[in-house]
Image (cartoon, grey):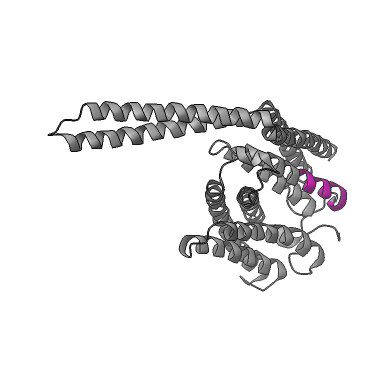
Amino acid sequence: MTFSLVAIWSAMAMYALAFIAFTLDLASRAAPDKLDASTDAARDARGAGIGAVAARAAAAGASTTTSSGADGADGSGRGSRGGTAVLERTVNAADGAMRSTKWVRIAMALTVIGWVLHAGGTVFRGLAAGRVPWANMFEFSLTATAIVVGVFLLVQFWQDLRFLGAYVVAFALLLLGLATVNFYVDVVPLPPALQSYWLVIHVFVASLGTGFFALGAGLSIAQLLQASGQTKRMRFLTTLPDAVRLENMAYRLIVVGFVFWTFTLIAGAIWAEHAWGRYWGWDTKEVWTFIIWVIFAGYIHARATRGWRGSRSAWLAIIGFAAVIFNFTIVNLFFKGLHAYSGLMN
């Protein structure tokens, strides 16, 4: 138990330092010299790309004859498209280089160290309990936040989301602080209903879904800020992807989270049948799990078939994640039911 708490408090210290570094990174992006340098780099790259396109078009036009005029025009079009692609890659590379500041590299290193300590503290708690460490609110807070940060780090191999670092580590730091101060309980035996392999499957998959929903909500918040036209007040927004790209990334992550949450709902029903002899009983926790599923199902359906774009889809994603947090905190603490496993009443 001592090793677990020491590791968790050490992880919180690393997350706090990472939050400061991520904040300094955003501040450095907003500095006028950084923005001017980024603009100059993009302008130079764009000029070089346009020059290449013009040169290709001129070469294609010079080789055009009366009998092959159409072919020459087609060649010019292909050259223009090729030059445009090169231009876009060059501008994106210049923009990416500007975003990779020393502060974000320091922040990511601190986040990795914090996550290793965090995961270690969670494992130590499980070893002390002799079971998986997610049987009460304190343990689930440890596990869920470790998975959220782990998903954030893993997603970096697919997409550069380091600009969400301050949001992710602040979320983990806040929840860990609340858990260690307000939700802490000693290791106790599992209630009979939790003595099942479904505890491992159901809660772990729910935590994975929560991790993807958290990132989707973060991207949706960034999307709303990007579309608000407040770049003069929040100048770091000019270094982030545009609102359309942020929305598309959020959608992809939320779809993955929705798959995990669907499995969570199904696994919970199967577990309920094993534990209580019925698949569905309209218990408060069951109802809120279903409400969350409906919100994100509506989000995906509306965006795919009704053409919901922009702020409406972003707000729906944020509301869905807020419902997840409500389900974990308010429902666990203040609603009675068969799923009252906060551990605080023991």
Query: Residue 12 lies in what quarter of the image?
Result: top right
The residue range painted magenta reads 173-183
With respect to residue 275, does 133 lie above or below?
above
Numbered circles on residues, count: 0
Looking at the image, which residue is at 78% across and 48% down? 175
Q: Report the front residue among 23 and 320.
A: 23
Query: Residue 160 lies in what quarter of the image?
Result: top right
Q: In this rendering, does residue 132 appear at all?
A: no
Q: Report the front residue among 223 and 81.
A: 81
With respect to residue 59, does 255 lie above or below?
below
With respect to residue 171, does 285 lie above or below?
below
Q: Does 307 appear in magenta? A: no
Image x and y of residue 47, in percent = 46, 28
Looking at the image, which residue is at 56% across and 61% down? 299
Image quadrant for the N terminus?
top right
With respect to residue 282, does 252 lie above or below?
above
Instruction: Considering the whole magenta stretch, tell me its main secondary structure.
Output: helix
Image x and y of residue 310, in percent = 56, 56
Q: Is 100 left or right of 130, judged from the image as shown?
A: left
Image quadrant for the C terminus?
bottom right
Query: Residue 39 lies in what quarter of the image?
Result: top right
Q: In this rendering, does residue 7 appear at all?
A: yes
Q: Report the front residue among 31 and 105.
A: 31
